Image (cartoon, rainbow, N blue to C red):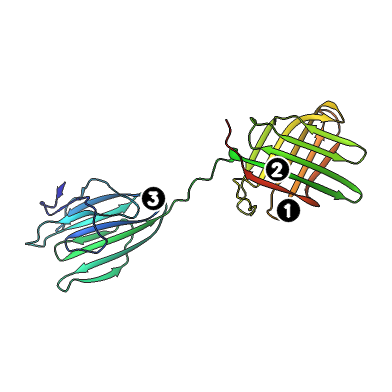
Amino acid sequence: QSVSSGTTNAVGDTTTSTPAFSRLKVCKVGNVSGTFTVSAAPAGGGSPTVLSPITVAAGQCRIVAEDFDTATGVGGNITVTETSAGLQSISAQRIDAPAGTISSFTFTNGQTLFLNSFHGYTITFTNNVPPPPPPLGNGRFTGGGQIRIGEFRISQGLTIHCDKILSNNLEINWPGGNNFKMEEHLTTVECSDNPAIIQAPPAAPLDTLIGTGVGRFNNVDGYTVEFTLIDYGEPGDQDKVALKIFRTGQAPVLNLVLTTITQGNLQAHFDQPHK
């Protein structure tokens, strides 16, 4: 695609990163490819012509413009803009006649450079885009523990999944012979990953699980449990749990605000594949 009386055009050939006379090269570093818009205007002024967009893969260099008029050196003004996500830094080198000296210079995204047979440039863009987090539906909690408040002790054991498909287990015991056993499937569940909490090991897509379910309190149906589980990492002495067991319209039979477990361990995991 020719512009500036045939002196510059978008080429697209892959190349090395070394600057070369008459050429404007773009290199890409990082974990994503980059898309560039390029325009060229005559050296003496005039409206720029937009060249074909060019995509440069990570680890690759491509020529985005070239001056073919080596006899006159008239050249043109080339503007290069990187439009892809995750731009972190830009470095640049140029080669200049007559000695072919290569030097570094500061390039700002969208800057215009004068290109002819006496000058050449390589612009290197570093882009990194963090991978998406694994779906939280692939997580689960296991474990259990004991909570002591004075002489009052609550013990619980559990396996809870971050979905409403798989079977779950939650059983809670406390003084007076009281027992609650949740039915297998949750009513609601919400899993999240708080960047401020370091739950590993093991690696897991979550550190917090909030859920509700129904079950039997002292062998009587019709009770609801609301619970929060937080894994604060090993050895488990900072893990927290909140529990509330009640029947609609009645006072809770157990109401424990978010509390650090006294012994035991709550562990977040990646879940096994399931349908």
Q: Amino acid at mark 3?
A: Val
Q: Earlier in the sequence, mark 3 or mark 1?
A: 3
Disc number placed over residue 142 in the picture, else none:
2
Residue at the spot 72% in from the left edge and 42% down from the top edge = 228
Residue found farthest to the bottom: 99
Number of the front mark, 3 or 1: 1
Disc number placed over residue 32 in the picture, else none:
3
Residue at the spot 16% in from the left edge and 46% down from the top edge = 1
Q: Tell me the SS state at disc 3.
A: loop
User: 5 or 192: nearer the eye?
Assistant: 192
Q: Quadrant of residue 109?
A: bottom left
Q: Position of residue 85 (x, y in %)?
A: 40, 49
Q: Tell me the SS state at disc 1.
A: loop
Number of the front mark, 2 or 3: 2
Q: Say above or below: 43 vs 96.
A: above
Q: Position of residue 114 (x, y in %)?
A: 20, 61
Q: Amino acid at mark 2?
A: Thr
Disc number placed over residue 118 in the picture, else none:
none
User: 150 or 265: nearer the eye?
Assistant: 265
Label 2 and label 3: CA atoms lie apart by 37 Å
Disc number placed over residue 236 in the picture, else none:
1
